[in-house]
Image (cartoon, grey):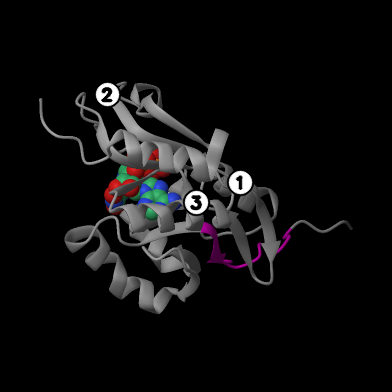
Amino acid sequence: MEKLLVTDKIQETFKRHFDDLVKLDHPLNGYCTFGTGGKARVFAEVGSARQIADLVKVAGETGVNVFMLGGGSNLLISDQGYDGLIIRNTIKGLEIQGEGILSGAGEDLQSMVDFAAESGLSGLEFATGIYGTVGGAIFGNAGAYGSETGGLLEWAELVDRQGSIRIEKSRLLRVLLPVVKIKDHGRIHYESQICTKNGQKRSDSHQDA
Ligand SMILES: Cc1cc2nc3c(=O)[nH]c(=O)nc-3n(C[C@H](O)[C@H](O)[C@H](O)COP(=O)(O)OP(=O)(O)OC[C@H]3O[C@@H](n4cnc5c(N)ncnc54)[C@H](O)[C@@H]3O)c2cc1C
């Protein structure tokens, strides 16, 4: 049998630090649209930036690989499982802030599209019907009909491998995105809240006589 990178001792370290937040040898097939996936040596479902930062910090200290999971709609998880830490981002929340929408990265993309429409904000129509979370759409720069998520993104909160939380403006994210995607997946995780610029607020053309 191949030697595990996440040893029993490392699993115990995660349990000691995070107690019920982490699950050990947790089956992943329920988190992937295709229903594939073995077990994660360490798994955590998180609802805050702080939790992600703390988990990533311990992963860094113990040399454990980290994978951020959104809605699992664009993944085939290996039936051999994941010898590392899987963080499932379930950070929710949608609110109007300034001229944009502030969204949790674990929010359903479609919920954000619906929220924008209900709030009279345009610009996100292209994303109707795209599965997954807001964080997943940013990671993949999901797009359709000539528009893309990155084009609307104002800023995102990120967690680095040292467990520091920081905000990056979209200009820098456009540079980081290909780097993260192609070269160094796992080093930077989108986290928590993103802000989309609002489109034109729809003017109400119907007027009472
Ligand atoms: C019309 C249409 C157009 C699409 N265009 C694109 C496209 O241009 N590019 C593309 O990649 N997909 C595209 N997709 C697929 C769709 O965008 C993805 O399936 C979806 O965005 C993935 O979201 P998810 O939450 O399910 O991510 P998952 O399937 O869980 O993860 C997918 C990837 O995103 C990463 N990820 C997820 N959440 C986070 C997070 N919070 N922080 C950091 N990384 C995270 C994961 O690590 C993984 O690498 C398109 C789909 C449709 C229907």
Q: Where is 72 relative to 179, above or below?
A: above
Counting from the top left corner in percent of width and height, residue 39 is at 31, 26
Disc 3: residue Cβ within 8 A of ligand 1's nearest atom: no
Residue 143 showing in the rendered view? no
Q: Is residue 162 above or below residue 108?
A: below
User: Pointers 3 and 2 in contact (CB under 8 A)?
Assistant: no
- State the CA–CA distance, disc 3 to disc 2: 36 Å
Front disc: 3 or 2? 2
Q: Is residue 51 visible?
A: yes
Of marks 1 and 2, the one in the foreground: 2
- The segment highlighted magenta reads 192-205
Q: Quadrant of residue 6?
A: top left
* Amino acid type, label 3: Glu
Q: Residue 114 colored magenta? A: no
Q: Earlier in the sequence, mark 3 or mark 2?
A: 2
Q: Which mark is residue 68?
A: none
Check disc 1 and give the amino acid type. Answer: Lys
- Residue hosting label 3: 125
Q: Position of residue 128 (x, y in %)?
A: 47, 43
**Residue at the disc numbered 2:** 38
**Tag count:** 3
The span from disc 1 to disc 2 (Cα, nearest Å) is: 27 Å
The residue that mark 1 highlights is 92
* Three-letter amino acid code of the residue under disc 2: Gly
Q: Residues within 10 Å of mark 1 (few under 14, many from 20)?
A: some
